[in-house]
Amino acid sequence: MEKIDRFIAVLEAKYRKKTKKSRILYGRAQKVMVRGGSHSLRLWAPYPFFMAKAKGPYVYDIDGNDYIDYWQGHYANILGHNPVVLKSELERFDPESGSLHTGFEGESQVRLAELLLKQIGCRDTKVRFTTSGTLATMYAVMLAQAHTGREGILKIGGGWHGASPYLLKAVKYHPKMGFVQGESAGVPKEILRKTHATRFDDPDDLEKIVRSKGNSLACFILEPFLGVGGFLAASKEYLQRARQLTEEYGIVLIFDEIISGFRFCPSGVQKLYGIEPDLSTFGKLIGGGHAVSAVAGRAEILEGSRAKVKQRVLFEGGTFSSHPQYMRSGYVMLKYLVEHADTVYPRLARAGDILRKRVEDVFIAEGIEAKCTGFGNATLRGSSLYMVNFPLKKMEYANAEDVWNPVLSDVRLKEEILKLALLTEDVHVVHGGGAISTAHEDRHLDRTVAAYGEAARLFKKYLF
C-alpha cells in the first residue's frame, strides 16, 4: 500500500502543478455543490480539471492544457467534439428557427422518428422521445410491466441502465456477493425483490433463471454490447436464446442500445445480429450532441402510453422532450451517419483495432500484463470502444465479473492510477479507455500510445 500511495502522491503533484486554476475553481464548486459537481464520474481525485472549450479529439481546460479526450461526451460524440460537418449542416437545415424553446411539435421530430425507425428496420414499430437514457430505460420497463401485467425484471449483472429505481440493482461488484445488491438508498425494497440478475453471455444461467421465474417476469433488459460492465460483445447464439426464451414465456425483450446504437453501424447492433427485440432504447448519438433518448419498438406496447388504454403508462414527456433544436441536430447526425456509413464505420473499426493492440503492447514491453476489452466478434466486426484491464492471473474477459472483481483484475490500477497517470500526459480516459471518434487521426493515436507507454514505465518504476 505504501508504494501505491507514494506513486499517487507523485502523480498528484504533477497534476496539481499544471491545473492550478482548476484547483481554485473546484474549491469554489465544493462550497455550493455536493462534492463540487453534479455527476460523480466527472469528480475524480484529487479534483477534476474544468473545461474551457472542446474541438475534435481535444478538450481544453481553463489552465490552457489540451487533452486528447476519449470520453467524448459520455461516448456521444462519434464525430468528435463540435464537428464542423454537423454545425454547417444545421445552419442550412433550420425549418423551425427563431426560438430557443417553444414547447410545440415540429417537423424535425417527425423526420428524426421516421429516419430512426427506417434504420432500425423492425416491423410495426413506433417511437417516443425523451431526454435521457435513464428515462428511456425506465419507461421501457414500465411499458413492459403494463403490457404483461407482471412486475418482475431481469437484467444483466454489471449492466448499467441509468438511475431508474427499477434498475438500480446488480450494477456494482460487491466482494463475496457479486452482482446482487441494491445500489441506492431510497429505492423501495419491494422493487429490489422483484429485480433479478443473470450473467452476461451465459445462456445456461439465463435459461435457469427464466425457467424458474419466467411467469413473473415482465421484461429482460440487456445491452447486446455490454457498456460500463466491460465493453463486451454478446454472442449471436446467446441473443438468439434470449429471444427464444422471452417469446416462450411472454417476456418483453428490451435491448438497451444507448451506447451501442449507431456506434457500430447506422442502426442498432440488433440489425447486425438479426434479432428483433420487443423494445429498444437509444440515446447519446441520436441527439447529435443534445439531450435526446428514445424508446422504440412494437407499436402495441408503445401504445400503452395512450390516454385511454386500461393499463396506461404515464410516458408523458418533459418540458424539453423533442426540443426542436435537439430533434434537428439528431436528424442531421443520423442522416450523416447513414450517408457516410461506408467511410465512418470502417475508419472507426480500424482505429479501435490499432489502439487496443498498441496499448497492450506498450504494457507488455514493460513486463506488465494488460488486456483490452472492446473487441468485436464474428457478428460485430470492428469496434471503436476500448477498456484497459489489468488481470491478476491468466484469463480472458467474458463478463462483468471478470472486469470488476478485484480478485481477478486490478480495478484500482485501472480506475484511479491509470487515469491520473494519463492526465499528466494530456490524455483523458474513463475506465482506462473510452470511445474513438472520427476526429482521432493517426497522430492522435500515436500521442495516446506514447502516453500509455509513459504510464507503463512509471508503473514498472513505482509498483512492479
Image (cartoon, rainbow, N blue to C red):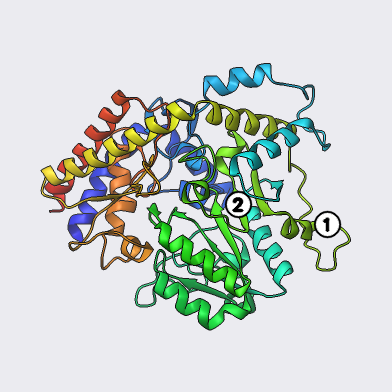
Residue 327 x %, y %: 69, 34
Q: Is residue 282 left or right of residue 111?
A: left
Q: Residue at x 81, y 64 (%)?
A: 312
- Quarter containing the N terminus: bottom left
The quarter holding residue 229 reads: bottom left
Return the disc, 2 or 1, that comes first in the chain's sequence.
Answer: 2
Residue 393 x %, y %: 18, 63
Q: Is residue 448 left or right of residue 116?
A: left
- Vertical arrangement, residue 184 with respect to residue 361, above or below: below
Number of callouts in the render? Answer: 2
Under mark 2, the amino acid is Thr
Q: Residue at x 28, y 33 (%)?
A: 448
Q: Which residue is mark 1?
A: 306
Residue density around tag 2, few if under 14, some if 14–19, many if 20 or more, within 10 Å: many
Q: Is residue 118 left or right of residue 95?
A: left
Q: Which residue is mark 2?
A: 281
* Residue 355 in sight: yes
Q: Secondary structure at mark 2?
A: strand
